[in-house]
Image (cartoon, grey):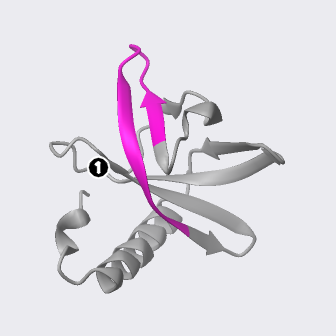
Amino acid sequence: MTDNNMIPENMDEMIDDVVVMTDDEGNEYLYDIACRITRDEDEYVVLVPQDEEDDEVVILKSVIVDDETEELVDVEDEELLVSIFEEAKALLIDEDEDDDAQFTDAE
């Protein structure tokens, strides 16, 4: 669900719920923030690619660095990732029953 080789370039690149991620080769990929899910004290960001050919959902943990900076970091716990993915899928399908194709199990 997540690709450890891609990181958000910096939080200045988060514009209107869009995250630009760059891989090791310098290729940029655009993701929309589909939703944010809170677990205990932690918040997770569910990203869906803008490229329709890419169907991999990315889930990252949101870490607030200061009042103006949010950092998105990898989540290592596979069970937590699956749980957040399922919750996000249910949440977004409930919001828009007609567009349930946004999430597909990519495992």
Between 68 and 10, the residue placed more toward the observer is 68
Left or right of residue 70: residue 27: left
Q: Is residue 79 visible?
A: yes
- Magenta residue check for 26: yes
Left or right of residue 29: residue 97: left
Q: Amino acid at mark 1?
A: Glu
Between 36 and 2, the residue placed more toward the observer is 36
Q: Position of residue 46 (x, y in %)?
A: 46, 59
- Magenta residue check for 9: no
Q: Is residue 104 visible?
A: no
Mark 1, residue position: 56
Residue 66 to residue 93: above or below: above
Q: Which residues are magenta?
A: 19-36
Which secondary structure type mostly characterizes the magenta part of the structure? strand
Between 38 and 12, the residue placed more toward the observer is 12
Q: Position of residue 97 (x, y in %)?
A: 23, 84
Query: For residue 71, which quarter of the picture?
Result: top right
Determine the secondary structure under disc 1: loop
Q: Position of residue 69 (x, y in %)?
A: 75, 41
Residue 16 to residue 13: above or below: below
